[in-house]
Amino acid sequence: MKVAVIGAGAIGSALAEDLCARDAITQVLICDARHSALEELHDRIQSPKMRSFQVDARDVNTIASIVRGSRCIISCVMPEYNYELAEMAVQLGSNYCDLGGDDRITEHVLSLGGPASRKSIWVVPNCGLAPGLVNILCMYGIHQFDSVKSARLRVGAVPLEPKDPLNLTIPFSADQFIDKLSLPVTLIEDGKLKHFEPLSGIEPIAFDAHESPLEAFYSSGSLSTLPHDLLGKVETLDFKTVACPGLAQKMKFVIALGLTDRRHIDVRTHRTYRDVFVRQLKRKTPENEPDVVLLRVSVTGVRDGETQTFVAKLHEEYDATLKISAMKQCTAVSAAIVAELLGSHQIAGGGAAPPEQIVPHKMYFDLLRERGVKISSQWQDA
């Protein structure tokens, strides 16, 4: 089975490495505009399965000629390219998945359900960690109940050795990081959709296997379509990002100063305040800092006449052997599994849907376990 990956950045390279290690995958095509990124990838992955092509994600016609015949095309580039790449995949008759990151673009990607269904292929956005794995885990928990009262989701990546002043790691683009902390948040409260301010709802939080104190707060873009899909099915859907203490207040200060605005600083350079902040954020934040992904999903409802709580947890640390951050690894592994399931026809039918609606949950978790990503779960009295 041939699979194509668009983007050889942090996630794309980790995804390509995972796919090359799978027996069912016979060829991995990877496209990126940066020659240096492709060179680095070949130095890292010594596999005859991999072929790379230097091409810009915006050059859809050239990419189409390269990836034709792929069972699945995976977008690991900035979200603004996802719709065009998804449309290309449908035209070629290939399954498609991506990492999400922009709810408006995800909505456009999901609009391709009609033509995808007619070709018996799937268009599946939001296949990373959040949105992605956390959505699948939440939906799995909900399916264990006769009726559900609440689903509370907490997930984040924190550095193993935090460094002042920000004490954070940014595995994706700094632009996406800023959007998560500055755009409105949609959740469910008292059975209704409700909008929250990002960086609000700050609460202390602890994880069994992590000694340092942490905080959690509202952030945007990590659930995507889930609040709308669960409306009328749960009374409460509550998601917060986990981070080192103080991050929310620090980012509130930065945003209040206007340093994330897209206003131009001067007309000569056309540089914005956000451009400068993003550049400095990249300079001051290590790219592959040893980190740990902490995730907890708690679903409370009625099961066999009793009120109970299902709790699932993930503690995934930086892989010193692979030299890859836990966030990158978890995100890439999740997307690789969805691509493998799509390409091997393990998901019948066709259309467009987020992974939590169509991925076989048990099969997905078994494949996570095969790759060393272990989720623990337990039942508690409510």
Image (cartoon, rainbow, N blue to C red):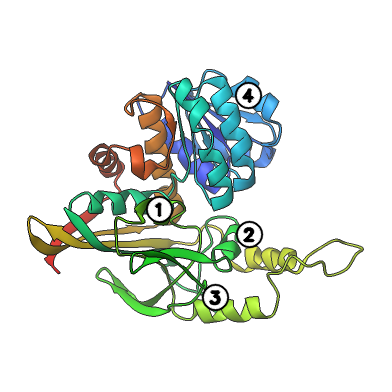
Q: Residue 64's mark?
A: 4
Disc 3 versus disc 4: distance between alpha carbons? 41 Å
Amino acid type, residue under disc 3 in the picture: Leu
Indicate the position of residue 44 as horizontal and vertical percent values: 51, 39
Quarter of the figure with residue 244: bottom left
Amino acid type, residue under disc 4 in the picture: Ala
What residue lies at 48% left-to-right and 77% top-to-bottom? 200
**Which element type, helix, strand or loop, lies under badge 1?**
helix
User: Which residue was labeled with disc 2?
Assistant: 175
Disc 2 versus disc 3: distance between alpha carbons? 16 Å
Q: Is residue 210 left or right of residue 50?
A: left
Whether residue 222 can be seen here:
yes
Amino acid type, residue under disc 2 in the picture: Asp
Quarter of the figure with residue 75: top right
Q: Nearer the viewer, mark 3 or mark 1?
A: 1
Q: Outermost residue, right direction?
A: 268
Disc 4 versus disc 2: distance between alpha carbons? 28 Å
User: Which residue was labeled with disc 3?
Assistant: 166
325 vs 192, nearest the viewer: 192
Q: Nearer the viewer, mark 2 or mark 3?
A: 2
